[in-house]
Image (cartoon, rainbow, N blue to C red):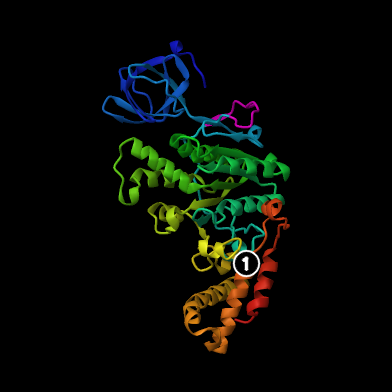
Amino acid sequence: MKNVTKNLEKVGHIRSLRGLIVEVDISGDRPEVKELLVVDGHPEIFLEVNFFRADTAVCINLTNDSALTCGQKIFRSHKKVSVPVGPATLGRVFNALGEPLDNAPIITDNRRPISEPSGTKSYRGVQKLEMLETGLKVIDFLTPFVKGRKIGIVGGAGVGKTVLTMEMIHNVTRNEKSLSIYCGVGERIREGNELYETLKETDVLKNTVMFFGQMDSTPAIRSMVGPAAATAAEYFRDEEGRDILFFVDNIYRHTQALTELSTNMGLIPSEGGYSPLVFAELRRLEDRLSSTDKGTITSVQAVYIPADDLSDPAVQAISQQLDSVLVLSRTVAENGIRPAVDLLKTTSSLLTPQIVGERHYRLAGRVQSIMQKYDSLKNIIAIVGENELSPADRADYQNAKKLIQFFSQDFAVAEHLNGKPGQYFTIEQTLSGIEEIIGKQT
């Protein structure tokens, strides 16, 4: 993307600098929104036009380079941020600008701008929905993983969102020829490297494209990783008719990066500290992760909860875009249960007889009823003791405790840490195990 400025069209000069925000006085033809501008004498620096204020272009310094000064000449590139797409990207790792992070050359000229959705009309087919087995009992039972839909793994810091996401990648892709896109937003560099090595060792990397904008990146780069990964997924869906598994860790960091940019641009935030622009951009990204008549995108999104507050406006906005929400609880995690799923707060619009079958649906209803009863009985037991309960209540309380333990299982991706081999359960094994605890009769 490097150019010689003398061959480019001059557009103006830098008027002011404020963090990542660069204001450019326009004296020539007005550039397009999202177009990249080049700085005189610094072809390695790119400014992305964000919006206009009269004859001033408000731009974002993508590289966060400190070589900029007021008065420098600015030139048009007539280009936008683009990423490589197609089969040549499989097994590769890129940043939001489409630059390789794995020290290997780019072997394709096929690139697409990340700011332009494919334009293919999405739809929700009338055919029978196809369930994808994850091998994780609690997910397959309470939040069925359905092809072409979205599932969120919601939780605070340190409750196991990333590990659970990695386990799903390991399990769902191990017996599938599906193509996977991984989008790492604002997470730890160590975790990204561990995931890369895990996928490489399990031979899954060859069918995966990875995009990273981790916590050491600027908010501009972190906010662009999601659209970059979505661009790659759209190409495989629309041009090759592929079924895509799209993993995001962490989608909340996407809204956080947009919030930081809004603050830099001086936009007034609404309640909760988020600007309206943040939620509009979030919906725009989620809309791109949809299925068409050519292919499907099935999405798994980790969602960080700030201060363990499920009512946070950003968490609520993200949850509204999801078909299933798997809530991880710090209280459950402290009891040594992995995955640390809150069985009562976890919800799914896909848990219907038409999708999972009558047997599964009835069992899920009974489990939720038992867990609600367990939750109400805990306070009573704390006061009078379990022996004071009626036989029926005592039986339900014991069954609830058995269910909590039943849904705990060892992860394959954590085997090198705890020495315990990973467990994989089919949906039939899960249903049979639950029936053994609570019985088959309704």
Confirm whether residue 141 shows in the render: yes
> In the rendered view, does 115 fall on the left or right side of 165?
left
Identify the image quadrant of residue 434: bottom right
**Location of residue 54 in the rendering, given as x and y in whole percent from the top left corner:** 26, 27
Q: Going 55% across and 63% down the picture, which residue do you hit?
A: 334
| Residue found at the far left of this picture | 54
Range of residues picked out in magenta: 100-112
**Location of residue 139 in the rendering, given as x and y in whole percent from the top left corner:** 60, 61
Confirm whether residue 358 shows in the render: no
**Location of residue 347 in the rendering, given as x and y in whole percent from the top left corner:** 50, 64
Q: Going 50% across and 77% down the picture, which residue do you hit?
A: 378
Q: Going 68% across and 72% down the picture, which residue do you hit?
A: 433
Q: Which residue bears the numbered disc 1?
A: 407
Mark 1 neighbour density, 10 Å: few (under 14) some (14–19) many (20 or more): many
**Location of residue 426 in the rendering, given as x and y in whole percent from the top left corner:** 70, 63
> In the rendered view, does 231 fall on the left or right side of 133?
left
Number of callouts in the render? 1
Q: Main secondary structure of the magenta part?
A: loop
User: Residue 101 lies in magenta, yes or no?
Assistant: yes
Give whichever of 33, 386 is nearer the camera.
Answer: 386
Q: Is residue 208 above or below residue 298?
A: above
- Tell me the quarter of the image containing the C terminus: bottom right
